[in-house]
Amino acid sequence: MSAIDPFASAASLAEAIRARRIGCLELLDLYLKRAEAHNPELNAIVVWQVEKARERARAADAALAKGEIWGPLHGLPMTVKDSYNVVGLPTTFGNPALKDNIATENADVVERLLKAGAIIYGKTNIPYLLADIQAYNDLYGTTNNPWDLTRTPGGSSGGGAAALAAGLVALEAGSDIAGSLRYPPHHCGIYGHRPSFGVVSWRGHALPGILNPTDISAVGPMARDAGDLALAMNVLAGPDALNLPAWRVELPPPRATKLRDFRVAVWSQSPLAPVSRSMADKLEAAVAAVGRKGAKVDGKARPAFDSEAGHRTYLTLLRSATAARLPEETFEAQMKIAGTIAPGDFSHKAAVARGVALRHREWLEADEARMRMRLAWAEFFKDFDVLVAPISPVPAIEHEHNPDWDARRIMVDGTPQPYMDQFFWAGLPACCHLPATSAPSGFVDGLPVGLQVIGPEGGDLTTIEFARLLAQEIGGFVPPPRYSA
């Protein structure tokens, strides 16, 4: 067995490369060998550029031999989500009609990773049009969870989370509009970070012909170690080319560097999305550990807005934002459904149709409601540094591909709950442009579970630091036994 630990943090692997204790090609070949052995049953990596990656790894080794270091990720093997443009590879969004959509330019995220020295050897699986919190599509098939192949790794960044957890790659770039950088880490036992809206350039993460950023959507990293999220954010944060002449992104340092100095709010339950008792227990145990270190903990504090109305605002803006991804025939069908929706119908079906058919005046009203919530959050975070909340009511579910989402159910303490209710927890930070870090919180029924650490706008390094410190108290990533050897 290789002396290199495939589950080591990206930072430690990058440091070992710079110190020339391991070679760039050596590390890449280790991950490729593991991918060859394990990816067939996981179906996590679905697009490859192996020879190009090996050429870059050789060049990275040659550069080191001359004393040249390309950047903080020099020689580090990575994958990125299918939805990022990578020159020469297809960007499909899981849509068979886009199987020949070959990128001619790199996404900004990809370009920054490459300039930092990373070696991208493949792309990872997603749901169709990124529109699920699982990872399956008719083009590439279904991705399985490394902890239980009968279960989903989450979505939409599910392939990347599975690859990280199984030790097939050192770092991953994903995206999040409705939990896609948080559900997969929760399901797979890793870390993910949804950045503050606009802190990382979205350009090149889009369907063909789309140039404007998608409202609510954020792009960011996933890793096996919280410290790697900070490493990645220092590489990725920055404006796009249009704003670059006048704008700079300078993330403030963490508000605290010791748990005892954090002011922590906790939101562990809501009637809008009931959380299983075992999940809530894990979250509360994590918070108790923080409290024992001296942190100020408050389980009752909430931002000053009605959570149900806030969630409806999120769903309205979410479905309006994703309407541009819909094929024309689907868009027209949703417009017809919208004409039949009763005013008091707040089902998932109604939310989708209502968002698609939203008039511009109505969108402006929803955006104004969001601004009021953003201001309420800003006031809230004057008194607290982070808010700890669930990501999902339950651990990873078994694969569920029923096309009628209204018929889908998840079992929460023996009670069937609507599949889409869990979007409440995803929407808490996403609607209002807040950063959120997903961190492991333990195991339930042999499956990893997580929590999310939400912070003020621009407080990305604060939420990441809290997650890093939390791991010192309750533990962090654990390799799935099936892939630990």
Image: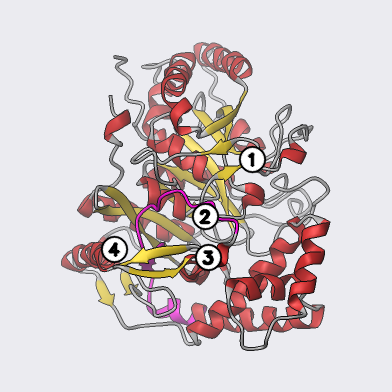
Residue labelled with disc 2: 133
Q: CA distance from mark 2 to mark 1?
A: 16 Å
Percent of width and height locating residue 71: 54, 31
Amino acid residing under circle 2: Ile
- Of the image marks 3 and 4, the number of the one nearer the N terminus: 4
Amino acid residing under circle 4: Met
Secondary element type, mark 4: helix
Percent of width and height locating residue 295: 24, 69
> Which of the 4 image quarters holds residue 473?
bottom left
Amino acid residing under circle 3: Ala
Front position in the image: 279 or 96: 96
Q: CA distance from mark 4 to mark 1?
A: 32 Å
> Which of the 4 image quarters holds residue 97?
top right
Residue labelled with disc 3: 407
Q: Which quarter of the rendering shows the N terminus?
A: top left
The boundaries of the magenta stretch are 378-403
Q: Are marks 4 and 1 in contact (CB under 8 Å)?
A: no
Q: Residues within 10 Å of mark 3 (few under 14, many from 20)?
A: few
- Of the image marks 4 and 1, the number of the one nearer the N terminus: 1
Front position in the image: 227 or 355: 355
In the drawing, what numbered circle is on residue 57?
Answer: none
Can I make out residue 190 in this image? no
Residue labelled with disc 4: 279
Q: Residue at x 24, y 47 (%)?
A: 446
Q: Residue at x 69, y 46 (%)?
A: 205
Can I make out residue 90 in this image? yes
- Of the image marks 4 and 2, the number of the one nearer the N terminus: 2
